[in-house]
Amino acid sequence: MAQRRPSYLRVFLTFARNSLVRDTMFRTNFLLQCISSAGWTLMNVGFYLIVFQHTPLIGPESGWGKYEFFVFLATTWLINSLVQTFFMTNADDYSELIRTGNLDFVLLKPIDTQFLVSFQKMDWSSLSTFTAGVILLVVALWQLTTRPVHPLSISPWMVGLYLFYLCCGVAIFYSLMISLASTSIWLGRNQTLYDFWFYITNFARYPMEIYNRGWGVPLWGFFTFVVPVLVVVNVPARLLAQPLHPQRSLSWQLACFALLATIVSLLASRWVFQRALLSYRSASS
Amino acid sequence: MYRGDFALGTLMRFLPIVTQIFLWWAIFDTIGHGTRDSANIVGYSFSNMVAYYLLTMVSRAFSSMPGLASGIALQIRSGEIKKYLIQPIGMLEFLLLSRLAHKLAYYSVAVLPFLLVFSICRGYFVDGWPAWDLLAGYVAALLMSFLLGFFLEASIGLIGFWFLEVSSLLFIYMLFNFFLSGHMFPLDMLPAPWDRLVSMLPLKYLAYYPAAIFLGKVPREELIGELWIEAGWVVFFIVTARVAYRLGVRRYSGYGG
């Protein structure tokens, strides 16, 4: 029998449909999850509204004023919600598959194991944060483009680049997440590593300029060049909110670096995933 | 058995404070035009702000009760609660003692990472230790925050007698708790009329209030009065939890073995 290459797109769409069916089976729960995510985003906005009552900018001459920062915050939500929708549940399940030995059944399927492990479930309720991100982004951009002094002008190019770097950000986060999840093959259970993921991505939630002082410089270097989480949100948010920043050439260097970081992260995570699989020994007979 | 994991996990919990330090550093640099030490926000200098976040970690060590409310609700739903009805021990007393034992065991190990972080960050405590009366008030506020946290969460968990699923309610509580207990920022920063409204809620005693006493942000003349109000809230939630338990048990029906 001739071996047919599976249609990855069709498999993915089937996963998405199945997840949606499962999510909407418990409609009240789904709705409550959406509401609580929206509540969380509201609290975040509340916090920064309070912060900006006391300061005009985050960092002297950084250009991150209230609405520029809200573009940044919205970008954080967009990327995080996409990662949560597509990958969070799956990475969580992956450790469980390894622990219980059920990964055997995944390995037997005639499709790429990393694809199957990464996309099996989708958490549709996380898209409520995505919606909140879009709303905040539109409001912030409206304020920036209609302000009387130095109004921001947005070109289709900027939008295109923003969307592209949004995808790069998701890819970097995904690489980090799947690499951390893969380590559970070696470590058995890695709850602490998951916490670690949350804490590391916490660094990505702020403009990178804030680390550029005192003992933050080594942190800035580490989270830009070694584990490149700082470029995840910073690059797209900067391209959209601060295209005319005095350090424009630096922005472009950063953008090029972000592209390189995405490619290297994806390749590195693929390597870690496959190396880890080689050490998999199942859990029982 | 997992002491290393414990210690590492506790150390990691301080990581978000690192990002908070840089966020506030940038903000204070902005306000102070490059000299962060000359700036202040609602009476907090930059050092005060960092010390505040570190102290809220201590408050939370006492007042946070992970899994308490959801555990109670689960026991009600699964019928496990029956065991308290036939054994000569009250559920609330049993849970309180086991929580106390757990906290003692956990923090006897976790005290090391706490000490490590505090000794690294001792430079942020510019005023040193508070006077003995404030220190006594601080300890009293911390101890009461443990009781308040316990009985407040237990009361929420006991709602499970009336509504079987309380997880979404709990999430909303956690959200409010995070924001209004002062875990996210010093409550003094709230604009009017929110500041007055939030100061009337019991949530501030879970994180903000002990830290504020330590940093001398609570005027001495108000200290005793505020501690009495906190004690009042503790009594209120003890009574609420007991009444809820009694009414709930009367309503509860367990079937099967």
Image (cartoon, rainbow, N blue to C red):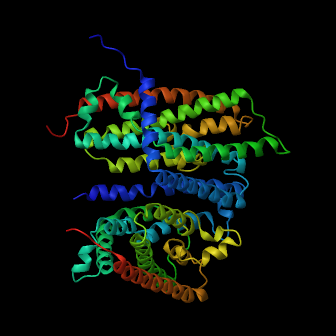
| Above/below status of B175 relative to A163 | below
Image quadrant for the C terminus of chain A? top left
Q: Is residue B115 left or right of residue A142?
A: left
Q: Is residue A175 left or right of residue B107?
A: right
Q: Nearer the viewer, residue B188 or B160?
A: B160
The quarter holding residue B48 reads bottom right
- Residue B92 in percent (x, y) is at 33, 79
**How many badges with numbers are in the image?**
0
What residue is drawn where x is 19% and y is 40%?
A283
Q: Specify whether residue B132 is in view.
A: no
| Above/below status of A91 relative to B57 | above
Q: Specify whether residue B100 is in view.
A: yes
Residue that protrudes farthest toward the right in the picture: A148
- Residue A199 in percent (x, y) is at 45, 50
What residue is drawn where x is 52% and y is 62%?
B175
- Residue B200 in percent (x, y) is at 60, 79
What residue is drawn where x is 58% and y is 47%?
A206
- Residue B6 in percent (x, y) is at 31, 59
| Above/below status of A106 relative to A59 | above
What residue is drawn where x is 19% and y is 34%?
A281
Residue that protrudes farthest toward the top in the picture: A2
The quarter holding residue B61 reads bottom left
Image quadrant for the N terminus of chain A? top left
